[in-house]
Amino acid sequence: MDTILVVNAGSSSVKFQVYSIEGEGILRRQLKGQMDGIGSRPRLRATGSTGNPLADRAYPIEAVPDVPAAMDIAGAWLRDELRIHPIAVGHRVVHGGPDYDRPIQVDHGVVTRLERFIALAPLHQPHNLAPIRSILANFPQLPQVACFDTAFHRTHSPVADHYAIPHQLYAEGVRRYGFHGLSYEYIAKTLPRVAPKIANGRVIVAHLGSGASMCALSAGRSVESTMGFTALDGLPMGTRPGQIDPGVVLYLISEKGMSASNIQNFLYRDCGLKGLSGVSNDMRELESSEDPRARLAIEYFNYRIGLNAGMLAAALQGLDAFVFTAGIGENSATIRAHVVGQLAWLGVTLDPALNSRNAQLISGSDSRIPVYVVPTDEELMIAQHTVSLLMKTASTNQRQERAS
């Protein structure tokens, strides 16, 4: 049985899934797992296709100091104990920069080019690339495919893509990219099945998690996003501020004497819900807190979602549906209710009973615009891209062989 391994690596965890290839590109999830607590309390956990436990093992800190070590342990477990030998590995890579507008098979040259964008996604890019390097070093013949969070948004018009800065900077790659593209692509491909009446219409998708953004879809294509050059812009997030006046950064430099590296760390790790609340960056903890600052952080989060919904509706010149997805969007009935309240001016109403059950359609029967909850699946999207690229490469090689 041929399998595909999907890897999504972060700073302290490596998430992975294995899919079997059945028929013509049909994928079936066989297992999902993660090695988390890297460098602190390493733990390997995995479940099978029905949720049955496959592994739950703790390791000493020194055994798993970094992502490559985590990959070695997880890979050995897959190979030696489960006898899984994937024919390819698909990776989530957050930033593809101006070079990559679609998935690509990775070699050392591609990795070198992707390293140029580490400064644009410092929380993600170096950790996304670490397992790629590890596999290139240990299994150089194993095909690897990089799938980019920025690629889906490359359909933006030049007007949506530019900043009002000299063109030379745009030519160098300083432009509005947008992120969470794998999630939005999955939603766009899923809507024809779950909500065919609105799939080709004007849809706002709110990807609300520790990282949060919103995307305007027109006939399934991205036309605008709340995120831009980096993953700092747009909505407030767990530890990132979202939209902020550039003058604040200048103030931190001139008045607070902060260096570029200190500001980067501050904006990526100390702001957002964490900075506003002083309590936590976890929405579940904020919702259960009685601290007034926690309530302020939640209100701010909801308020900014409402403001950005207006912006995206203007980009679409109307609105046919609103979709919640990702961790908060899929699981927090309270946040969804508050956001729908922000959309009341559009004639949106909520069915509280459906919302409390996390139903697929949660808007009221009298709502002018339907509101959906659609779980995302970035890993499946990566697996599909990986198989598609392998099949395309194999087809190209066969044609070349016949021609020769």
Image (spheres, helix red, strand yellow):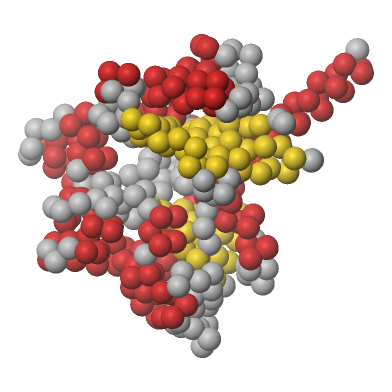
Left or right placement of residue 194 versus residue 279 in this view: right
Left or right placement of residue 107 versus residue 175 in this view: right
> Residue 190: horizontal and vertical position, in percent?
63, 58
From this view, report whether residue 71 is shown above or below residue 272.
above
Which residue is found at the position 12% from the left and 63% from the top?
A: 291
Can see residue 245?
Answer: no
Which residue is found at the position 91% from the left and 12% from the top?
A: 404
> Residue 17: horizontal and vertical position, in percent?
54, 37
Quarter of the figure with the N terminus:
top right
Q: Nearer the viewer, residue 63 or 308?
A: 63
> Residue 386: horizontal and vertical position, in percent?
64, 34
Which residue is found at the position 37% from the left and 74% from the top?
A: 337
Which residue is found at the position 28% from the left and 57% from the top?
A: 283
Can see residue 69?
Answer: yes
Q: Nearer the viewer, residue 363 or 177?
A: 363
> Residue 354: horizontal and vertical position, in percent?
47, 77
Q: Nearer the viewer, residue 98 or 240?
A: 240
Q: How many marks?
A: 0
